[in-house]
Image (cartoon, rainbow, N blue to C red):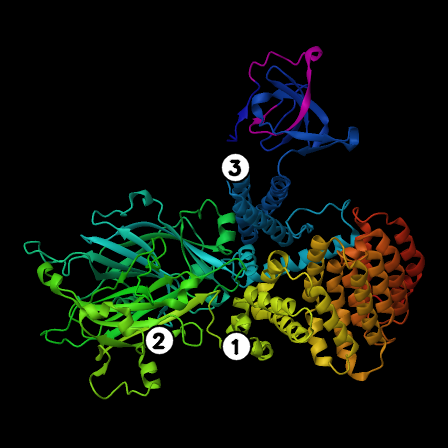
Amino acid sequence: MAHNQHHKGAKHNCLFPSPVIAPLLLSFLSPAIYNYDAQGEEELSLQIGDTVHILETYEGWYRGHRLRRKSKKGIFPACYIHLKEATVEGSGQKETVIPTELPLVQEVTTTLREWASIWRDLYVGDKREMFNSVRDMIYDLIEWRSQILSGTLPQDELTELKQKVTSKIDYGNKYLDLDLVVRDKDGNILDPELTSTVNLFRAHEAASKQIEDRIQEEKSQKQNIDLSRQAKFASTPAFALFVTLKNVVCKIGEDAEVLMSLYDPVESKFISENYLVKWSSSGLVKDIDQLHNLRAVFTDLGSEDLKREKISFVCQIVRVGRMELRDNNTKKLTSGLRRPFGVAVMDVTDIITGKMDDEDKQHFIPFQPVAGENDFLQTVINKVIAAKEVNHKGQGLWVTLKLLPGDIHQIRKDFPHLVDRSTAVARKMGFPEIIMPGDVRNDIYVTLVQGEFDKGSKTTPKNVEVTMSVYDEDGKKLENVIFPGAGDEGILEYKSVIYYQVKQPRWFETIKVAIPIEDVNRSHLRFTFRHRSSQDSKDKSEKIFALSFVKLMRYDGTTLRDGEHDLIVYKAEAKKLEDSSLYLNLPATKLELEEKGYSATGKSTLNLGNCTISKDSFQISTLVCSTKLTQNVDLLGLLKWRSNTSLLQQNLCQLMKVEGGEVVKFLQDTLDALFNIMMENSDSDTFDTLVFDALVFIIGLIADRKFQHFNPVLETYIRKHFSATLAYTKLTKVLKNYVENAEKLTEQLLKAMKALEYIFKFIVRSRVLFNQLYENKGEADFMESLRNLFTSFNDMMNSNSENTGMVKGAALKYIPTIVNDVKLVFDPKELSKLFTEFILKVPLGRLVKQKLDCLIDIVHSDLFTQHDCREILLPLMTDQLKFHLEKREELKACCQLLSDILEVLYRKDVGPTQWHVQIIMEKLLRTVNRTVISMGRESPHI
């Protein structure tokens, strides 16, 4: 808007009559948008961009001064400037004017002004490369500033943009050798008046390192990877691909199903469920309410998916209509047949790894029709992936794609403008890296793989259609448990694609079966095979010619194993095949047949009761994604421990051998089982140690890097699901026994130490629940048991035993982790005294670093922020510091401890601190000075 032209002060015969000047009640800070040349002494000249502080106003004129030259005040026309609200602090020489806009916008404005003058000098000095770099940075900041000021960005994008702005400013300042701005983790400038010296120094160090890293990134030509975005994805274990289907440009001529999913081309397998859109023959989506709202989110992707060499977004189009498209309608033709039509494939590796991120870009995915009537869709997918380009003739799909961080709950919260309740959710076939306790899932993915069918009395191979349904053992069909794709309702039965006159059809069609948990053990999958004729009259007379089935639960109570199953194809009269009682007792797979002593090969047919085993073959593969069903016998034994208590001891021991992923998946059920065992045997301590060890094993699993994302799951369980009110007595007892016998039980105690934080979370939560029920009953006994436990720790620390060195180190490392929880149920002052005694028991000259690290952790705990507790802890810490500084031991740790103490004492929310600062000055100032003098300037700690 700023026109670079001189507006002469034409005909302003209204010179400012001083008696009627109206002083402004609200201050304004205003940039000039035109140049203005003063016409007399009383006027003020302006140049575009000058910021003016307005003092008074009168009939279209203002009086004020430029911020850069406060002494010269004058009048100027109101239309030459743009008004911005501001506040004035101080007066006279100390007067400062602060714009009432976002601090970041202010910072961008001042930065741009500073850079602009340097930019001009670079132009004059003919430093072209630097001039171009600064120009690009200025353009970026101007663009981002206007985006922030627009006020139209959603919260998540605004946060991301702020990060980009501060990162660019810091990088630019370093590039131009200007002062480094020190910020907090949210990117706000730290106020030196409100920030402690220690904190400022640390923030300065962190900022320098960050900017150095950024410069290295720029140098290594990695500008295309946005750092803040990387950090955001690194901090979440799950992410999702958001897809909007804009249009399907394809001449089909019949109704069709558009099935979209993620695919790994290296392993030739689908990663996700299908997102299904039904398309009508008129060229629009069938459900007209979905027009312009075809959105899906492919969730549960994790770090393993990022590591995949390639990921493709695959779309399969299946037409639903007559057998052959070119048939005209003179004869009565069979309709409603699912026939292959073609595929479209796009490589989305760059979008999933974050190298490309443009949610507004519409991608065209070219369409490849099937070559012939017997061209398998899976084969076409692999051909398209291998081919360099597709001769699409303008046919294809238009989609937009965006990667979103978080699981589905997080995404709905952070991106409500993209993902709402109407957005289809296509889950990963397999578990996400983190399963929350409330996330109950019971999905069985069934893939129709392939088959081989004899043509029988026909002259050509059959057009085989497989129909899959789910029945219970009484022969009742389960309704709405089969899901062909996200975005579609549950159906009664699933019909496969038909390949025309093919002896060995290969389907590779995956369907989700979601059965209520209580029905799984009674259910089986039933596959019936039928030849479909293109003519309606013939088709009606075609009956089911064979059947296969598989039970979802094995004889030992575990679920159907994942992987391929070679099913037996049974032949019988169509009526008999309807009756499940006739086939359910027969073997379902070739493997079962062999186990029963029959040879699966050899003779062409084998009679079993009313059914004959055909020489036809049929393979499926299954994948169970269930938080309630396990394929592990040992884990099942523990989860169903009540059914056979004599095996309880064995089951508890076997738990330690179960694969971690399986235990973690059933975390809530496993923990429930352990505490139920403990509670239902409350009179005896037979199982206490075994349950304690099992608990330690589970906590240890979650500490493993592979399962670290399950920490919040365990926290949620303790907070919301845990209910064992008496567990605290048993857990405390076993732990005390381990500590007292540290020499004999070193290995068990070491494991228990690593799990100490969560063991105490269980103890404290159990005690809190007990208090709520019985109003502080048994308070004295509980306090005494904790005192005794600390006494045992002290005795262990004081012992001279050689082989307890590691356990002592572990105690120093892990005891601080329990403080914040124990404080909830135990007197904090007494806890501080117990902790002081514990530290004083550490043998002299040993475990010095571990001891100082332990003290640092206590400074970071809630205990040290309480004035009364600090009265007890601070003398201990200053004595320890004085002792080790004088001996020049572990100076780095001493330095850290002292600076952390001062950091806490600087805070305003920790009660009175003056006396504590005085203690430090009296006890340590002389020692610190002498230590510094003796160290010399080269020391990294100076």
- Residue at 74% of width from left, 73% of height from top? 810
Give the mark, 2 or 3, whose residue is nearer the N terminus. 3
Q: Circle 3 sits in a helix, a strand or a loop, which is it?
A: helix
Category of crowding for the residue at label 2, using alpha-carbon neighbours closer than 10 angstroms: few (below 14), some (14–19), many (at least 20) = some
Q: Is residue 252 left or right of residue 908?
A: left
In the displayed orientation, state which residue is furthest to the front: 683
Residue 383 visible: no
* 373 versus 596 height, above or below: above
Q: Residues within 10 Å of mark 3 (few under 14, many from 20)?
A: few
Q: Are marks 2 and 3 in contact (CB under 8 Å)?
A: no
How far is mark 2 from mark 3, CA to CA? 57 Å
Q: Nearer the viewer, residue 101 or 807?
A: 807
In x, y percent, where is residue 501? 15, 70
Residue in view at x 66 percent, y 30 percent: 86
Residue nearest the viewer, comparing 798 with 677 = 677
| Closer to viewer: mark 2 or mark 3 | 2
User: How far is disc 2 from disc 1 in space, using C-alphas?
Assistant: 23 Å
Q: Is residue 867 above or below residue 263?
A: above
| Residue at position x 64%, y 31% in the image | 51
Q: Amino acid at mark 3?
A: Ser
The residue that mark 3 highlights is 150
Horizontal side of 898 relative to 257 (left or right) equals right
Please check the rendered image and state whether residue 503 is part of the magenta-colored stretch, yes or no.
no
Extent of the magenta region = 10-37
Disc 3 and disc 1 in contact, CB within 8 angstroms: no
The residue at which mark 2 appears reads as 564
Q: Which residue is mark 1?
A: 634
- Amino acid type, callout 1: Asp
